[in-house]
Image (tube, grey):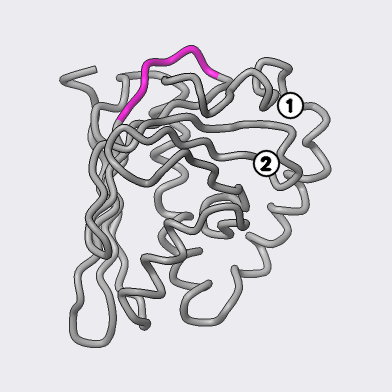
Amino acid sequence: MAGGEKAIFRVIIRGSIDSVWREITKIGELQKCMFNMRLETDGLKPGGQIRMRSPSGKYTAIVGEVLEFQPPHRYVHTFRFTQFDDPPCTVIHELKEVDGGVEYTLTHENLPDGTKTAKQMNQGGPMICSTLKAVIERGRPSFGVRLLHVLFKVLEPLTPGKCRSENWPLENKV
């Protein structure tokens, strides 16, 4: 959706560009900085389908398509929450080596104005950046984020049925 909101979040991380890149692109493992979800894909390449699934794999929170993939500097994909009927937006992950580590920039573009998606994305951006920093620098998220991960697990049975993973196979383009 052209003309939507745009949000930019940035953090400097003491670590290597390869360790940051691996954390945001690892497949089939929990991504603690991405709300403890598991990335599944048919390929991290333009046109590849991505799904962010719950740790159990029973639910899919996010669907998208890879638009650009330039390791270890740039990863761009569409993004849509499965629980909302909002149009997709675009997420851009950019990494740049700087003195003392890596500058990680998370950009959300074309956020549908006034939607639940825009609200969630604007709230989630700072947490993703700070959790990514903690995971790379200290090996784990903050205590508060770890508690949030436990809460997500406890509340998983209350997830709407339309978010069940069988409704979002990788074979279906989004």
For this view, does 24 lie left or right of residue 51? left
| Dots 1, 2 in contact, CB < 8 A | yes
Residue type for callout 2? Ser
Q: Residue 87 appears at what percent x and percent y?
A: 37, 16
| Most common SS among magenta residues | loop
Task: Tell which circle, 1 or 2, labels the residue nearer the N-terminal end.
Answer: 2
Residue 127, placed above or below residue 138? above
Q: Quadrant of residue 138?
A: bottom right
Q: Could you say which disc has been placed on residue 54 in the image? A: 2
Q: Amino acid at mark 1?
A: Thr
Question: Where's the C terminus, which quadrant?
Answer: top left
Which percent across, then down, holds residue 50?
A: 46, 37
SS for tag 1? loop
Whether 87 is among the magenta residues is: yes
Estimate how packed mark 2 is, as few (under 14), some (14 to 19) or many (20 or more) residues with alpha carbons within 10 Å: many
Q: Which residue shows up at 47% across the image and 81% down it?
A: 137
**Measured along the vertical axis of the image, is residue 20 above or below residue 84?**
below
Which residue: 47% across, 23% down? 116
* Quadrant assignment for the N terminus: top left
- Image point (53%, 53%), residue name: 27
Residue numbers of the magenta segment: 84-89
Where does label 1 land, which residue?
159
Q: Report the mark closest to the observer, 1 or 2.
A: 2
The foreground one among 159 and 166 is: 166
Seen from the viewer's position, the closer of residues 14 and 50 is 50
Q: Nearer the viewer, residue 94 or 18?
A: 18
Question: Is the residue marked by circle 1 packed among few (<14), some (14-19), or many (20+) residues within 10 Å?
Answer: some
Horizontal side of 137 relative to 9 (left or right) equals right
Name the residue at the bottom extreme.
100
Q: Look at the image and say whether residue 171 sits in the magenta stretch.
A: no
In which image quadrant can residue 10 be found?
bottom left
Q: How many marks?
A: 2
